[in-house]
Image (tube, rainbow, N blue to C red):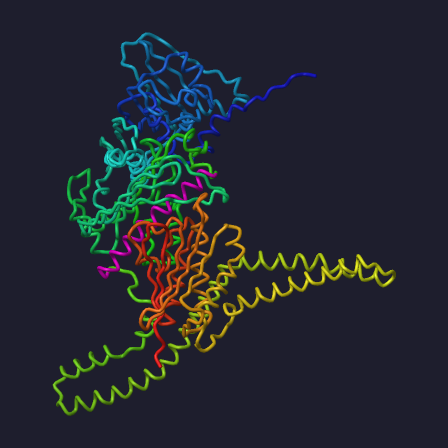
Amino acid sequence: MPVNKIRPAARLIRTIGQDLIKDVYAAIVELVKNAYDADSPSVIVRFSFNEHKQTLSISVEDQGHGMTVDTVINKWLVPATDDKLKRKRSDKGRTLQGRKGIGRFAAGILGDRILLDTCAEGRMTSLLLDMDELEHTKYLDEFEIAIAEHKSSAPNGTRIEIEKSDVSAFDVKNIWNPRQIRKLLVELRSLTAPEEIFQVAAKQGFEIRHDAFEMRLIFEEFPIEEYAGREIVIKPFPILDLYDYKISGTVDSSGLAALVFENRNVSAIIENIDLKIPLELNDNQAYPGDIFVDLRVYDRDPSNIENIIRRGLIDPDTNEYVGKQEARRILDEYYGVGIYREQFRVRPYGEQSFDWLDLDKQRVQNPSFRIGHNQLIGFVHVRSEEVSGLQEKSARDGLTENNAYFGLFTIVSKVINELEARRFQYRQKSMKGGRSKTLDEELTNLFDFDEAKKKISRELGNLGISHTQQLQIELAVENVLQSESLKKSDYVRKIRDTIATYQGQATLGKITHIILHEGRKHIKYISETVPRIAKWAAQLSKKPDPELEVTLQERNEKIQVHTKGLSALFKKIEPLARTRRSPPKDLNLLQEVLSARDIYSSEIEAGKVVVEIDFEANDLVVFGIEIDLITIFSNLFENSVFWLSHNGDKVRKINIQAFKDKDDLIVEFKDNGPGFQGGNLDLMFEPGYSMKPAGMGLGLALVGEAMSRVGGTIEAKHSRDGAIFELTFKKKND
């Protein structure tokens, strides 16, 4: 049998450049990274247009160690070489960026001919790679490249020039217009993290290799007047220090986070946050090794834009303070959360068009609490692929979405949630946003006309009419408003009842998995046993069998048990499924707590949770509606069972105590889970705030609203061992 070989087509090289690499910016970035890998202290990206020859050339020049002819032949000209993958670090200890072995061929997207001049060990090696010739060659092993080598006194270094032929000045203006050049500038400015980030990381115990690496962009005889003859040293905009809020710190390989929150609006607010970020490891997630995060928020309302400018937003090209429009443009170019490996950004994370954390999608649900994608400039530093498990795709279009990636997503989302909570807390107190009242209180105030009466009275006083006339008009207005208020009060009640019904059904939705699990268990037994009973009954009708009669009786009794189980399940959830609210009445608190516990009995048993209920008396009464109490206690059970699942081998306990305190009835709902972390206990009941990795911030918000409807209050408290919710039910007014 003849032996055959795979013969790559010659056009493979062009395919790498044009199809595999995302865009022209990625191509230039790849060549810049190669200069870094060569231990060069700097790199020059040079644009030059020759109108006479109708050619545009883009060259990337470095002062690195250069390449010998052997390196060029056996490594540079070998697509997908594993040289850098094996070496991992350069001669000077830099972490090598181009491990895929294809970055240099990205140049094919920029032009038709690639010229290489590289000097090492006193010898210059040169070659020309003509992409058009490649197109007309069938197989790659048939394509011949002439390589010239000679002695040279030139310093070590490499110059790659990509030439595009048959282009006019008009073509160049279309290929590289001012907007695209600006985009390239942004790409290069955001290619490496600012030095300040490395300093912050070092202070918090996360060392990042940071070598000085200067980038310059030079335009020679360029047809765009704005850039012709210019040399631009790539510097990041000094936007980073001008933030409103910041959270930064480390998260280790087990999810332990040590963070620092800062509020620039109030200089005294600096808070240390230590917490454990749990991952649902059975949900395709894994801890991505040690990471460092630095996330900065820039509020974009007009007053905050002014504050950013006042703090020192200066254009690095002009050294002048920018205006509001320019400030917004700068924010528009630099917002996003980038992922960095050492000092280089992994594309496309951090780009404005790539909201990889779904920030805008979440903000739509709760705009006063959530931070939008365009309000955040962030840096997430991860370790090498070998350590983190975070693998970069060959096409340079992101990380492979494996378990480590999903773990990283959850961790960064949780850190952002901590930032959001503290920002929301400040804005709420300073009247810059947020909701300071419960939904029930806001509904009550919706048709409160007291303020309107005061305004009418003031306006009447300004009209110069007599005091008697003013009193008559005010009385008439009072009567009209009072009549309207009485009419609208019925609307308020209907709205309140409708919201409460929906919240009860939201709780029902949260426990659907329990209903399905419990219901299927009963239905499975019944559906499997009934046919057997029918079969056995037919056998007994033909021939008596005492043993079979006993079996039949046992199975019949078990069917009754499962039927009662289904009935009990439906009875538990029936109040939550009602479309109309029943009137309030006296409810036995112990029975309501037991009903909520029974809903979660399977989860409690599966999680080996011990539930202790200690009531001062068994006849403690709360005046309210059953759906509200079930909403309250079922959500508290669900919350505790979730966090207790992160207790490891520690005994898991829920303890519920109830007692009278003067005229109030107090319930303490405790668990010995990880407890509350940070200082945001007053935000626990705000919609959208959740400490769970994938939490929606719904459960405790429902609890808070339901407590308000029964005329009570709930408070989250710190504990040495776990979490405490204190519920206060007020005495019913006779």
Q: For residue 624, what is the image quadrant? A: bottom left
Q: For residue 255, what is the image quadrant? A: top left
Q: Nearer the viewer, residue 262 or 315?
A: 262
Above or below for 45 versus 292: above
Q: Nearer the viewer, residue 301 or 483?
A: 483
Above or below for 621 versus 62: below
Q: Is residue 461 left or right of residue 182?
A: left
Q: Does the magenta portion include 46? A: no
Q: For residue 295, what is the image quadrant? A: top left
Numbered range of the magenta stretch: 403-431
* Residue 396 location (% of width, % of height): 42, 34
Above or below for 217 versus 633: above
Rendered residue at 53%/17% (across/down): 142
* Residue 326 location (% of width, % of height): 22, 47
What secondary structure is the magenta-colored segment mainly? Answer: helix
* Residue 507 location (% of width, % of height): 47, 63
Above or below for 432 versus 318: below
